[in-house]
Amino acid sequence: MDLLAAGLALLAALLFAVASVAQRGAAAEVPDDAARGVRLVLRLVRSRRWWAGTVGDTAAYVVQAAALGLGSVLLVQPLLVTSLLFALPLEARRSGRRVPAPARRWSAALVVALALFVVVGGPTAGADRSPPSAWLLPGAVLVVLTVACVLGAGRRRGARRAALLAAAAGLCYGLVGVLTKSMVSLLTTGLVPVLTGWETWVLVVAVTVGTYLQQTAYGAGPLSASLPAVAVGEPLAASVLGVVVLGEDIRASGPVLVLIGVLVAVMVVATAALARGAAAGAPGVRRPARTS
């Protein structure tokens, strides 16, 4: 089951990467004078590339849900960061450039750290669902952290504002990952439990708020400030919730536990570095507006 869950997580990461590159390409084709607000949205919804990316995102989420239905959050969510490994060469090919040497080194570090984490740590599954009482304290902490990030962003400008808003989005997306696992469990009992389950509606709220915060972060400052915060914040938040709420664990103790800590640190640093590199390589120059 874990092997199949890992394979599905990697497939989801690939689909997320393809969707991301497609949507960035569509956004890059929008002239500067139409690259804000409603005019941007109206341009994008007329783009086949943007719709292809949206379909890819939807397919990736379905595959992610299937992976979470088979494996633990501690296994699936960290593997999703490999979307950065897929996105870098895809973006480089689209733009006719080579993947920079530092990105290749960080990619290798991330692959090694992830492989060792899965093999040495052996993440174990916990409960698929937990009662609302188990969510009260961690849920309250999550809300407080998210609100603190948003309020802190209100007092700042530029890169710091973008990073704080993106961190808040990452917290929301981490919650989405854990709630998705619960929703998949509900789905096995029928559609009615899904529609009446509190997890489903909290998930909808988390997706909505997370998407709004992420888009606001993209407009508040450089992508190099916001993308790493989301890329790191989502798996970290999901993993903590998986342990605290669902009772997941890693099979390690003593020196091995120290090694796991080092591997997690390497994954965080490598993910942030790759996200920053992906943001730097993202299309930033738009075609000039037509004058005729």
Image: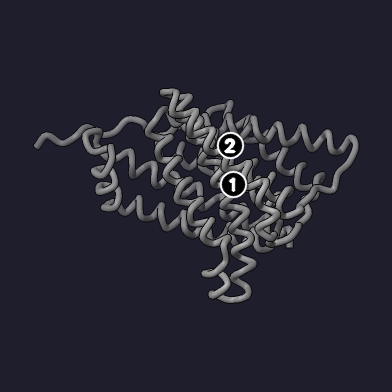
In this view of the protein, can residue 178 be seen by the observer? yes
Toward which corner of the image does residue 104 lie, by quadrant? top right
The quadrant of the image that shows the N terminus is bottom right
Between residues 181 and 193, which one lies in front from this camera angle?
193
Between the residue at mark 1 and the residue at mark 2, the CA separation in whole angstroms equals 13 Å
Name the residue type under label 1.
Answer: Gly
- Can you identify the residue that label 1 sits on? 174
Q: x, y (%) of residue 67?
A: 64, 59
Q: Residue at x 41, y 54 (%)?
A: 54
Q: Are marks 1 and 2 in contact (CB under 8 Å)?
A: no
Q: Is residue 209 left or right of 249 when viewed as pictured?
A: left
Q: Residue at x 61, y 65 (%)?
A: 184
Residue at far left of view: 292
Name which of mark 1 and mark 2 comes first in the sequence: 2
Q: Is residue 14 above or below residue 104?
A: below
Q: Residue at x 62, y 44 (%)?
A: 140
Q: Residues within 10 Å of mark 1 (few under 14, many from 20)?
A: many
- Can you identify the residue that label 2 sits on? 145
Between residues 34 and 91, which one lies in front from this camera angle?
34
Q: x, y (%) of residue 283?
A: 38, 34
